[in-house]
């Protein structure tokens, strides 16, 4: 990645990403890294296809969790800090990065952006419920790049959209999502099977993997941390099956073998942006071929280009439902939403359109 591209990415974090997602601290850090050659060099060690800001900030968050005596931790509510972001924070951030560079580098060079934001299940639920209703069948759930697979467990959570609740009333995971406008209360679809496929699935019973999941969250977002911890406990009681390997080798035969009475519904949540153009084309071809065997539903969040030429430019994202039958696809817009699932605006009048693969 070129230096100019890195600078642009971190400036964008300062101007848009961290502002929209309510992190004054990361906004300051974004601007600070953008003008610091040594910090840019450190961030540039992220693996190809990975977002350097996410990787750098998560690596620091994880290392700082081991060194809470450092004054930088005072700015991290996730680590017990109570100090508001100020001009001193970027100075301490730089100091910490330089002092612990040798510990940060292996993480930056090896880890993937695998934020398992469980509140996104509140965005996935409406299109998943629509897919089940449209097919008149329970769902065989699949997820591309599921991280620890927490969103594959969406039927085990409780949801609150404004004053309305649905889901498992006994669940320890309550996902609150502000409705902006009317939201039809989605029924919790019955799940016949579930499976995630990832090049590096994270294990909820592995403390290093759990520490990385926590590090990927943003410091001020203690509500997200509480939800993550609760969802991890749900997953530990009955973990979703996750396969490690190549999506294109593993997905087709598993889709064919899924329960015949179920409708195949695949989640792709903030993962297709990491695909090369060749991988995206191969995914299109794979889905079209599979739809000749059985209908396929695909829910996409975070990479609108796969559905139509309407790129996500930061800020709110679009949640799409694609339906494929006998090689022919059509799609609708489910909602416009906050990337972390804090709110959604349901597109109740959205019509099905022909998908131009």
Image (cartoon, rainbow, N blue to C red):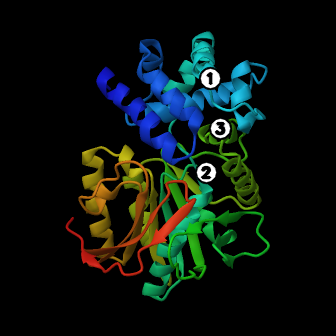
Q: Within 10 Å of the Cα at label 3, are there few (<14), some (14-19), or many (20+) other Cα atoms? A: many
**Separation of marks 3 and 1 at Cα, in angstroms:** 13 Å
Q: Name the residue under label 2.
A: 148
Residue 15 location (% of width, % of height): 43, 37
Q: Is mark 3 on a helix, strand or loop?
A: loop
N-term-proximal mark, 3 vs 1: 1
Q: Is residue 229 above or below residue 186?
A: above
Q: Are marks 1 and 2 in contact (CB under 8 Å)?
A: no
Residue 135 location (% of width, % of height): 43, 85
Residue 89 shows which numbered tag?
1
**Separation of marks 1 and 2 at Cα, in angstroms:** 31 Å
N-term-proximal mark, 1 vs 2: 1
Q: Name the residue under label 3.
A: 219
Who is closer to the viewer here, 255 or 10? 10
Residue 151 shows which numbered tag?
none
Assign the N terminus to one quadrant of the image.
top left
Residue in the image at 39% along x and 48% along y: 314
Taking the view exactly as shown, the residue that stands out farthest to the left is 356
Q: Is mark 1 on a helix, strand or loop?
A: helix
**Front position among marks 2 and 3:** 3
**Front position among marks 1 and 2:** 1
Who is closer to the viewer here, 87 or 61? 87
**Separation of marks 2 and 3 at Cα, in angstroms:** 20 Å
Q: Is residue 357 above or below residue 339?
A: below
Q: Within 10 Å of the Cα at label 1, are there few (<14), some (14-19), or many (20+) other Cα atoms? A: many
Residue 307 location (% of width, % of height): 29, 63
């Amino acid at each position: 990645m070129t230096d100019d591209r890195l600078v642009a990415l971190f400036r964008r974090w300062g101007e848009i990403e961290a502002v929209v997602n309510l992190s004054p601290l990361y906004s300051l850090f974004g601007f600070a890294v953008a003008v610091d050659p040594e910090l840019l060099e450190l961030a540039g060690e992220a693996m190809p296809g990975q977002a350097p800001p996410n990787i750098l900030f998560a690596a620091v968050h994880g290392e700082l969790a081991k060194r809470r005596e450092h004054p930088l931790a005072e700015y991290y509510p996730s680590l017990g800090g109570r100090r508001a972001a100020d001009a001193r924070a970027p100075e301490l951030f730089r100091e910490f990065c330089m002092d612990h560079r040798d510990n940060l580098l292996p993480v930056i060079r090896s880890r993937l952006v695998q934020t398992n934001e469980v509140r996104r299940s509140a965005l996935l639920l409406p299109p998943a419920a629509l897919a089940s209703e449209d097919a008149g069948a329970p769902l065989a759930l699949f997820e591309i790049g599921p991280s620890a697979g927490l969103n594959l467990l969406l039927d085990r959570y409780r949801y609150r959209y404004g004053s309305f609740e649905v889901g498992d009333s006994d669940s320890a995971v309550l996902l609150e999502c502000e409705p902006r406008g009317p939201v039809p209360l989605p029924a919790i679809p019955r799940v016949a099977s579930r499976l995630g496929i990832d090049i590096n699935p994270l294990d909820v019973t592995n403390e290093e993997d759990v520490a990385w999941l926590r590090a990927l969250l943003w410091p001020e977002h203690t509500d997200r941390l509480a939800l993550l911890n609760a969802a991890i406990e749900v997953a530990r009681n009955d973990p979703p099956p996750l396969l490690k390997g190549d999506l294109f080798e593993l997905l087709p035969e598993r889709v064919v073998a899924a329960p015949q009475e179920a409708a195949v519904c695949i989640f792709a949540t903030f993962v297709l942006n990491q695909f090369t153009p060749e991988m995206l084309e191969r995914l299109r071809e794979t889905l079209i071929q599979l739809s000749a065997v059985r209908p396929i539903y695909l829910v996409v969040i975070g990479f609108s280009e796969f559905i139509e030429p309407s790129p996500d430019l930061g800020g709110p994202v679009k949640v799409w439902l694609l339906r494929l039958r006998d090689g022919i696809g059509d799609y609708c817009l489910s909602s416009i939403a906050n990337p972390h699932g804090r709110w959604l605006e349901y597109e109740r009048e959205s019509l099905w359109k022909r998908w131009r693969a």
